[in-house]
Image: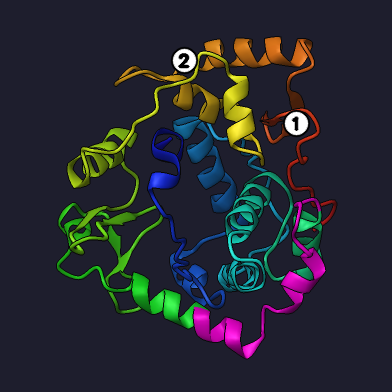
Amino acid sequence: MIEWRYGAQIAWRLVLVGLSEDLSRYDRMGYTPVRGALSALHFRDRYGMPFAPGIKRGRAASSRACRAVIAARRTVPGSEWAVFRALSLANFSTPLLFDHDEQMVEALSGLPGVDAAATVALIDDPAVVAEYESDKAETRTAAGSATELQGKAGNSDGAVRYTAPSVVFTRVRDGLRLEAGGFQPVEAYDVLVANLDPTLQRRQPPEDVAELLAFFPHGLCTQEVAALLARGNDAPDRAGAEAALLTLLHDGRADYHPLGDDAIWTAPGGPAPPRVSAA
């Protein structure tokens, strides 16, 4: 939503946390495939995301997926966002396990401008690993921060770290830094941006839903569209958003790609969501 409101006036940078290198952490937590499915169910019900909480055949650490994102960032700067989103959606809506490289290739194969096989092949490249370690170190600097004060920091390996999806805004002209740690309502991000620079142009929700699909070429799920259409502090109207999207579909101005218990909506001819056929 912040990206829609402020567009190119904000430059974004994706930093990977690197939550787990192996399964030892999950073993200590008693984290099983069933708990993973229940977690997806929680996020689906709380946030409306298109998750299919199936029970996977195993578990996998997040490290290789993080390094795939960094490989994309190094190969085609800017593509890391699409790769990150595709792997996230596939993780929660398909049998994908991050320790199966062929499954990651399959999940990324439909992304325009991304060579899926070449990206995954770079996961163990020394330069990719070094950049990954740099990202990890950067995220583990939350000690004494506002994020820690709010109880939204984590500590899984001895260092206080920012949790996903923490956002840190830095004003270029003087380095002033404001942060919103962990999950926050969108209004929290908007207040930070408005205080950092009240001279910015702020775009309102569109009158025509098709504008959103044109702005986000990799598509949006129904709940994302509902959030983007909400005005002020109004609650998202999911039913209203879905009705508007169905009208676009009927008029040939949108495509519908089933995913999980929902769909990804794109402009006509937009890319389909990630698929993984087997675990």
Q: Are marks 1 and 2 in contact (CB under 8 Å)?
A: no
Residue 221 can be seen, yes or no: no
CA–CA distance between discs 1 and 2? 20 Å
Please name the residue shown 60% across and 37% down the image.
Answer: 216
| Earlier-in-chain disc, 1 versus 2 | 2
Most foreground residue, 182 or 114? 114
Q: Identify the residue under disc 2.
A: 237
Q: Is residue 45 above or below residue 173?
A: above
Q: Is residue 241 above or below residue 104?
A: above
Most foreground residue, 19 or 170? 170
Quadrant of the rendering where the N terminus is positioned: top left
Q: Residue furthest right?
A: 277
Please name the residue shown 70% across and 71% down the image.
Answer: 99
Residue type at mark 1: give it: Pro
Tell me if residue 103 is in the magenta stretch. no
Which residues lie in the magenta part? 110-131
Which quarter of the figure has residue 231? top left
| In this rendering, position of residue 32 left or right of residue 186 | right
Number of numbered discs visible in the structure rendering: 2
Pinpoint residue 81: horizontal percent, then vertical percent. 57, 55
Please name the residue shown 35% across and 70% down the image.
Answer: 139
Q: Identify the residue under disc 1.
A: 258
| In this rendering, position of residue 24 left or right of residue 91 | left
